[in-house]
Amino acid sequence: MRVIVIGAGEVGFDVARLLSMEQHDVVVVDLDPEAVESVAGRLDVMTISGNGTSMSTLDRAGVRKADMMVAVTAIDEVNIIACMIADRVGVPTTIARVRSGELSEASSIINTSDLGIDLVIHPEESAAKEVTQLIHRASATDVLTFADERLQLVGMRLDHESEVIGKTLREFVEENPDLVFRVAALSRGIRTILPRGNEKLRFNDQIFLLARPKVVPHLARLCGKREGKMQNIMILGGNNIAALIASQLATKNRRIKIVEPDRERAESLANELSNVLVIHGESTDIDLLATEGLGEMDAFVAVTEDEESNLVTCLLAKHLGVTKTVALLSKGAYIPISQSIGLDAAVSTKLAVSREIMRFLRGKHVMSVATVHGLDAEILEIKAAVRSPITKAPIAELDIPNGVLIGAIMRGKEVEIATGATHVQPDDRTIVFVLPRLIGQAEKLFAKP
């Protein structure tokens, strides 16, 4: 597949890296020669320095022969226009990163299809939703939802208080017959394990549990966690992500503070968010944060554009006894080490873009694609085709590679956590955990022969 990526920033680089790993023919276009040179030196892709909205530049990139256009610059208008041009010359799939949510609103006069855009991605909205879920699940390092929020994948770090340390997964399940769940994956050091029943749980394992939301608090207690209420929350930074988080979390009994260095933006937020206290001040002013009660917070969320500041202030908050810390991080070097140095969770705007693009690449039978920080596996939501190998027998009787794990199935309105006795039927939507090297084999299990 030939894919043109407009934008060579962090998001564009990450998209190009993923596409290149999948052996696609990738062309990266950006106005900034230094950004283009950086991509060319680090990835095996073609690069072009030029304007992504210029027809001559796009012709040099081979737009008339492209299968997909992904526009992820920092400017919404550039992304929209680039996709419009691509659609006019016959590119089958166009994806635009758009920060403004106006195009997706029901009241919008112009919608995305009018502009020739197949998919608009709002990474800021996705990041805000992820932070909100992490605050609601105080014990979790990661939270993903599936099946219209009827299933949750929750990551938890096993510490000394966990009573499951030293037990096999089989013992964990057998000792809790009233709880329906699946241990979908383990992150141990730098290894990702899609475990079998004889795998023993160890101290500091990051365990990923798939279950219905009402079961999660019980599992958290077994893992040595306590699901405390997050009543006092401080948000560092007053960007769109912060505003979305505050509006989603604001309730009568919850006290939320936002610290924003730009006075005009702070005043705008104060007018927009009536139930939120907005403080004008520098995010690096430790005395200000302490004066405003940082040490008394239940949760601290840092979403400024300065990732180093997000890291440092979250570590300070943790040192002062804040229960839950969440940082906005995008640099690849920071995310894997964030939890090992003391952060509870990290979110990234890049992941939302990558997930949606990978869903398009996987084909129509793949309903969605998800990834988790620190977990070297993809989570696919795949629809089983008629006469596909996965439908031939119960899971325990099938030859499923080690590194492919069936987590759950959705049949109409019913959701079932998968066991060895589960028999996948045609048209079932299935949550599958797959190591990267086995994605092709996993897809064949669900495809028509």
Image: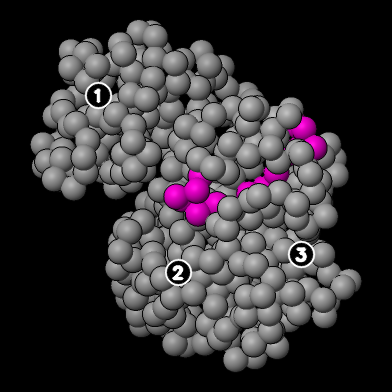
Q: Residue at x 62, y 75 (%)?
A: 199
Picture quadrant where residue 6 is located: top left
Tell me if 291 is positioned left or right of 216 in this view. Answer: left
Tell me if 204 is positioned left or right of 392 in this view. Answer: left
Residue 416 in percent (x, y) is at: 81, 51
Residue on which disc 2 sits: 191
Magenta span: 425-439
User: Is 431 in the magenta?
Assistant: yes
Q: Does residue 310 appear anywhere in the picture?
A: no
Q: Nearer the viewer, residue 267 or 332?
A: 332
Tell me if 175 is positioned left or right of 256 in this view. Answer: right
| Mark linked to residue 246 | none
Distance in Å between CA atoms under marks 1 and 2: 39 Å
Disc nearer the start of the sequence (1/2): 1
Residue on which disc 3 sits: 181
The amino acid sitting under disc 3 is: Phe
Residue 418 in percent (x, y) is at: 77, 55
Distance in Å between CA atoms under marks 3 and 2: 22 Å
The amino acid sitting under disc 2 is: Arg
Residue on which disc 1 sits: 52
Picture quadrant where residue 44 is located: top left
User: Is 378 in the magenta?
Assistant: no
